[in-house]
Each structure stands twice: as structure tokens, then as C-alpha cells.
Image (tube, helix red, strand yellow):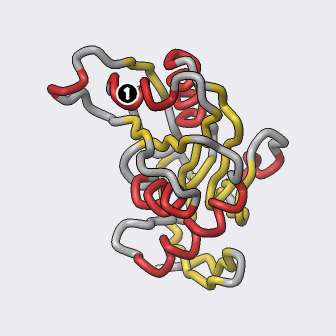
Amino acid sequence: MDYYKLDIKGFEHDLPILPIGGGIKICFFNLHGAQALTEHCGKEVAKLVAGAEVVITAESKGLQLAHVVARELGQDFYAVARKSKKLYMQDGIAVAVKSITTAETQTLYLSRHDADLIRGRKVAIVDDVISTGGSLAGLEKLVAEAGGEVFVKAFVLAEGASGDRDDVRYLARIPILKD
């Protein structure tokens, strides 16, 4: 397997290069189970979102990142956009999204508890990687529908052209590779 060598603010990490179809390969970044990497990235992302009153992320790879960021900001709770509707979410909010890593359009769900947490507050959207911006657009819609203000959008990695956006902050860039 081929790997992409990456330095994330002083933390060196090798990303496996994986095909996703159509002659495109991605440098796969995974925080699941990577405690030291998650802690490092969460502390660095927290610096990018200082001043936010609440953090929101999409499940699943953003969960542990949001946990560390919220902890570093001294926040007791963070909001989670779920990818399936749970029983306790009957009175929540839902939006459709499309991202590079999912074949189909999916729906993000926000519980009433998390919507109430966001209402009237400055919100930091945090996640592991921004690529096409599909998941980010869904999170922005959820924040707006909940009555919050998107204060800052921060990611560990910006993939491909997303690194050229001036409305997001990130720790490092990775390429999208073609065969």
C-alpha cells in the first residue's frame, strides 16, 4: 500500500492512499482509535475556534475531535449531527447532504437538545476533513435552522481545492490524487 506522509502542526502521520472510484484516490485520514493523534489535532483545532460558544460536528469521525475541542474550550456539551434518526430525535431538525466519501445523498439529524444548545450562540463547526464541502453545507443548514450563528468552520485537513477556500480554517492540506 502507498502512503502519503503528512505533518500536522508537528505531528507526523502516514495516510494510506485509497481508491474511491472514477480514477480518484484519497489520502485516508482516520481519527478512530488514534488517541494521541486525536488529542493533538483537537488541541490545535481548539486554537482555531477560540471564542466559539458551542461546537458541532457530524458523526462519526468528527466525534472524538469535537470532544477534545469542546473540552479545551471549557464547554460541557457539544452538538452532534447524526446520520440516522434515533428515537429521541422525533422533534429535531434534518437536512440532506452529499459528500465525497458517501455514494448516496444522506440526511443529517440534530436532536432538539442539540438544537436548543445552538440557538442564539456562536457555533464552531469542526470536522476531520473538508473536501467537496457537502457535509459542511449540511452542518451550516442545521446551525441556521436551529437559530445559531456559524462563527467559524475548522478542520484538521483540507483536501484538494478546499484548501483554497477563505471561509474555512485547517491544520494541514492533503491532495486528491488521480490515476
Q: Amino acid at mark 1?
A: Leu
Q: Residue at x 28, y 14 (%)?
A: 91
Count of marks, rendered view: 1
Identify the residue at image location x=51%, y=65%.
29
- Look at 26% across and 32% down and name the residue there: 84
Q: Is residue 61 above or below residue 103?
A: below
155, above or below 114, in the image? below
In the drawing, does residue 65 fall left or right of residue 33?
right
* Camera-side residue of 123 and 94: 123
Left or right position of 4 against 18: right
Q: Position of residue 122 (x, y in %)?
A: 64, 34
Residue 119, percent from left and from top: 52, 23
Q: Write the residue at 66% across / 31% down.
A: 150
Q: Is residue 140 above or below residue 174?
A: above
Question: Label 1: few (<14), some or many (≥20) within 10 Å?
Answer: many
Secondary structure of the residue carrying tag 1 is strand
Residue 174 in view (yes/no): yes
Question: Horizontally, is 146 left or right of 163 in the view?
Answer: left
Q: Quadrant of residue 115?
A: top left
Q: Residue furthest left?
A: 87
Along the viewing direction, whichever of 126 and 2 lies nearer the viewer = 126
Q: Which residue is mark 1?
A: 110
Quick one: 23 or 141, which is closer to the camera? 141
- Image position of 117 (left or right of 141): left
Q: Which of the 4 image quarters holds residue 170?
A: bottom right
In the rendered view, would you say 119 is above or below 16?
Answer: above
Q: Position of residue 140 (x, y in %)?
A: 59, 28
Q: Locate residue 148, reporting x and y percent.
A: 59, 24
Can see residue 25?
A: no
Location of the C terminus (image quadrant): bottom right
